[in-house]
Image: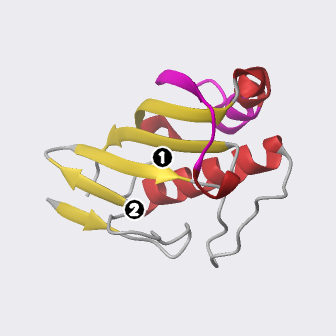
Amino acid sequence: MKILHTDNASSPAGHYSQAVSYQGTLYVSGQLPVSPDGTHNIGASFAEQARLALNNLLAIVQASGGTPESLLKVTVYVAGVKHWPEFDQVYAQALGAHRPARVVVPVPELHHGYLVEIEALAQSVS
């Protein structure tokens, strides 16, 4: 198992890694809309929060030597199903033609009051 960390995504606030690579798969921990410098963005719009969380996710995948096309499965937690359509738009803009498996899970709330959290599985290059 190889633990992965990049300064281009927010650092873990708890006892976990940004990602772990094992036997050809990259397991990316849940990414909140926290800027790489640690700035919390709780007051940002849903779309901006989604972009920030996706940017963290993609920075981690890129740090492993992958690309957005390396994503295999993405799990998205949104605070309320009403955000699903807006997330889908932001996600499509970020990934373009690539369509990994995905699930969007509506939840009543997320840590710190955020509106979105994203985790993923990707092909591991390193």
Q: Which residues are magenta?
A: 90-110
Which residue does the image show at 51% across and 76% down from the upper left?
7
Badge 1 element:
loop
| Disc 1 and disc 2 in contact, CB within 8 angstroms | no
Which residue does the image show at 29% across and 51% down from the upper left?
125
Which residue does the image show at 53% across and 42% down from the upper left?
118
Q: Quadrant of residue 44?
A: bottom right
Q: Quadrant of residue 63?
A: bottom left
Q: Residues within 10 Å of mark 2 (few under 14, many from 20)?
A: many
Residue 114 visible in the snapshot = yes
Q: Quadrant of the C terminus?
A: bottom left
Number of the label disc, if any, that sits on residue 67? 1
Q: How far, Cα to Cα, is label 1 from label 2?
A: 16 Å
Q: Which residue is mark 2?
A: 18
Residue 3 located within the stretch drawn in magenta: no
Residue 30 or residue 96, whichever sits in front: 30
Residue 99 visible in the snapshot = no
Q: How is the image coloured?
A: secondary structure
Rendering coords of residue 64 (x, y %): 36, 59
Mark in front: 1 vs 2: 2
